[in-house]
Image (cartoon, rainbow, N blue to C red):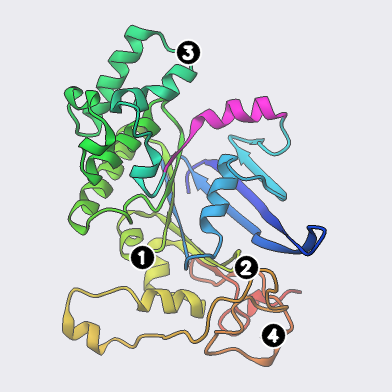
Amino acid sequence: MSEALLKVEDLRVEFPVRGGWLGGTTGIVKAVDGVSIEIGRGETVALVGESGCGKSTAGNAILGLVKASGGRILFEGQDLLALPPAEGARLRRDMQVIFQDPVSALNPKLSIAHSIAEPLIIAGMAGAARKARVAELLSIVGLSPEQGRRYPNELSGGQRQRVVIARALATQPKLIVCDEPVSALDVSIRSQILNLLMRLQREFGFSYLFISHDLSVVRHIADRVVVMYLGTIAEDGGADILFQKPVHPYTEALMSAIPLPDPKAQRARRQTILAGELPSPLNPPKGCPFVTRCPIAEERCARIRPVLAETGHGTRAACHVRNPAALPG
């Protein structure tokens, strides 16, 4: 892997649950519970899992949009959580985000050019230079300068997402967090936006943290994959290896749900069906987080929480049964 741009160590995000007559704390939701991620320069790391697993919360904590409860977020070697707020905010200018829904991400009262120019205004760029930069950004994402005079409601969904991408590129970031960037788009438009994101990465060399639940999209774009379950990491590793040889039963179930283009192959494939619902993060299982839904769970899985450990073929998995190294020593 290339030199690390971002290194997240034991990240935790907890939310107090308040209730009762006096509004006191009745519990703690562990939305992210000890997650560690490393992203190299020019690399795409995908963060995947079911809805509610904590992947978007982890991305928001890295960006500073939600407060981390513990751990370290090292960006170019500096711990963002240990720095004074002003210094941390300065470093986070090199991080940008592409949100899931371009409709809610854009102010309907601002023109497209104004929306793209906002980060440049904050950065103090002068008027003439700013106008030229906005025109350049529109061209980079495949829009015309004339479209800058329009408003969000005058553009299609794909065009609006191109605007969001242009705004993310405005300050020449080193890391872009893509939070489900194509899930709100028509299927016919998704491949165009994915190809645009990949082309921009080749041209400008920034890194992606790509958050998604669509593994067919992840397989197309990611260099490495991190699989989250109930706020923890179940498995991670290179995308090619992980898709071919998943170790953790949760990863295996996710992979088996990817639709195949050949109907015969789809019918012939053995699909892993998970029973039950995701446990509450207010009361997670004592042992393995996946034990309540795991088809191969053993008695020890309910008592002992596995650690994320090397599998021997380039991935790491937190599973006692499939990976004996995951048993804490």
Residue at the spot of label 2 = 308
Figure quadrant of the C terminus? bottom right
SS at mark 1?
helix
| Residue beneath the point at 63% across and 81% down | 320
**Pointer 4 or 1: first along the chain:** 1
Three-letter residue code for mark 4: Ala
Between the C-alphas of marks 4 and 1, the distance is 28 Å
Between the C-alphas of marks 1 and 3, the distance is 40 Å
Between the C-alphas of marks 2 and 1, the distance is 21 Å
Query: Badge 3, how many Cα within 10 Å: few under 14, some, many 20+?
Result: few
Q: Is residue 131 magenta?
A: no
Residue at the spot of label 1 = 215
Three-letter residue code for mark 2: Leu
Residue 285: x and y in percent read: 68, 78
Q: Is residue 184 left or right of residue 294?
A: left
* Boundaries of the magenta span: 84-98
**Pointer 4 or 2: first along the chain:** 4
**Pointer 1 or 3: first along the chain:** 3
Q: Is residue 93 magenta?
A: yes
Checking the image for residue 124, the label placed there is: 3
Does 207 appear above or below 135?
A: below
**Pointer 2 or 1: first along the chain:** 1
Query: Badge 4, how many Cα within 10 Å: few under 14, some, many 20+?
Result: some
